[in-house]
Amino acid sequence: MEIDPFIFRLSIFILSIFIGYYVVWSVTPSLHTPLMSVTNAISSVIIVGAIIAALAGESGNILDTANIFGFLAIILAAINIFGGFLVTQRMLAMYKKKKKDKK
Amino acid sequence: MISANLLAVFYLISGVLFILALRGLSSPETSRQGNLFGMIGMALAISVTMISVGNFSTGFLYLLILMLIGGSLGSFIAFKIPMTAMPELVAGFHSLVGLAAVFVAISAFLNPEVFNLGLPGNIKIASLIEMSLGAAIGAITFTGSVIAFLKLRGLMSGSPITFFGQHYINLVLGLVLVGLIFYLCKTQVDTWFWTIIIISFLLGVLLIIPIGGADMPVVISMLNSYSGWAAAGIGFTLENTALIITGALVGSSGAILSYIMCKGMNRSFFNVILGGWGATDQSSSDKSKEQKPVKSGNADDAAFLMKNASSVIIVPGYGMAVAQAQHALREMVDALKKNGVKVTYAIHPVAGRMPGHMNVLLAEANVPYDEVFELEEINNDFANCDVAYVIGANDVTNPVAKTDPQSPIYGMPILDVEKSKSVLFVKRSLSPGYAGIDNDLFYRDNTLMLFADAKKMTEDIIKSLN
């Protein structure tokens, strides 16, 4: 009997939850704000769905309703990707260690 | 074109890069590299998707233009936003992820052939369940985050909005949602799909309005988690590994942060979700209305005390963020260090309006992160410290949490500020904090109240120190 591909995806999902659990517990509390902004940025990978939705229509007319929703999602996700990663980078650049010469 | 298997491998690589991005955050040194991994993962996922679709016609041009617009807008926000506004920025970004998830779900529902989900009116049942869940969670995330944004931005009152039967309405709406998803699968009628989305929008609003300002750290973490589950739901619909992995990572990340925040307040998750403290506990503050003696001082007194101390612990809170006092605070600490005073910072898990809020503000003011300590690391040091400088924090220092079982904050872990030899408490007035309870600390013999704006007072102390 063949296994439904859904089960494979479910396995990936469950294992990823566990990976997330252990990885996030090891994040130092002082970086919890960058953690939120970076998780926000990576969850915008939903843009891949938006790209498919926007471009893959075979209807001939690129601007039918389904495609327009795809394009709208692309703008939203793009704001998030650039905004999320860059603001994270800006924050992380501020975390500095004590300079040795200063007491 | 690119084969489906190869595409799946690339998505897997993106997923792994995202895991490494989070892994990097275990220490500030590795975090910047981690963020780079995240960007590479995202660039990879986007490029292979474009190649796999293989449609480089007019639509592709639109796509590039829209990404450029969105990208510039996002970059502009990222560079312009002041660090004190991070909580509302993150809330705003969550709303965008939520709405994007709703849009992708709508698109998949209208044009299922594109995603191999069947035909309109005859979509695979499993896909229908996945996309309605993705759309529903996305819609809740969207409106919930918008409300959180408005509250954090001060465009809407931060106090809890409650009305009779609120939780029953939410419960009923939740059950209706389940019923609608069931009917949608049975009938494939699109009206049910739109109704699911509308009810979810409504539910998002209703879930967040009863939660008050100081509980925002929990709310933001929770919405962070929701945005992850929404992405995972869409990932199942689109059979996309990168989305499933990312959704699971973000979902569990947000859940863990919510847990840490709840633990920081010694409250259960449901207790926070079901409504604010401020609304429920007026009685305990009424009791202590009678005048008690308070010692108050000025900047010179504070400067004298700290200058002659050998160790000072700074306890920052939301008030510091409101007054934008972090830079002045750093200057004050520099002046103290010149006088040979040892200075450290103590941060309570729920200080501020989002997890790690105070740490970012201190980092912005160039405070080295190895001088900043979490509650468990530093709490024993208060007993050996000469002066504790409390700036903008209140409830998290209230000793009542340890002594009075009647108090609503009883059992909440607090910073043992009262154990230090003297306490300087910068506050505008004696008014109680968010929890609506009087802070016992104000009336202690070793406490000197500094009634002023946090920034103004700190600047005056610097003048007096020099």
Image (cartoon, coloured by chain):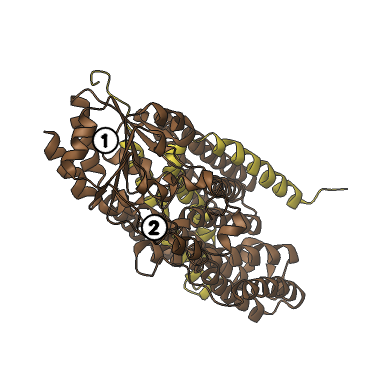
Chain colours: A yellow, B brown
Choose between B202 and B320: the one closer to the eye.
Answer: B320
Question: Which residue is identified by label 1?
Answer: B366
Q: Is residue B57 above or below residue B261?
A: below
Q: Chain of mark 1?
A: B
Task: Say which residue appears at 70% left-offset and 72% top-offset.
Answer: B175
- In this rendering, position of residue B167 left or right of residue B402: right
List the residue tagged with mark 2.
B432
Q: Position of residue B406 (x, y in %)?
A: 56, 54
Q: Quadrant of residue B232?
A: bottom right
Number of residue marks:
2
Q: Is residue B231 visible?
A: yes
**Residue that appears at 51% across and 75% down:** A65
Secondary structure found at label 2: loop
Foreground pick, B47 / B383 = B383
Q: Amino acid at mark 1?
A: Asn
As displayed, is residue B48 above or below residue A102? Answer: below
Outermost residue to the right: A1
Check the image and report above or below for B26 versus B407: above
In depth, the one of B296 and B27 nearer the eye is B296
User: Of callouts 1 and 2, which one flags the residue occurring earlier in the amino acid sequence?
Assistant: 1
**Residue B228, percent across and down?**
56, 53
Q: Tell me the element at label 1.
A: loop
Which quadrant is the C terminus of chain B positioned in? top left
The residue sitting at 34% across, 29% down in the picture is B371
> Is residue B35 among the parts visible in the rendering?
no
The residue lying at 47 percent from left, 42 percent from top is B414
Give the amino acid type for the residue marked by disc 2 in the picture.
Pro
* Residue B169, x across and y down, in percent: 63, 76
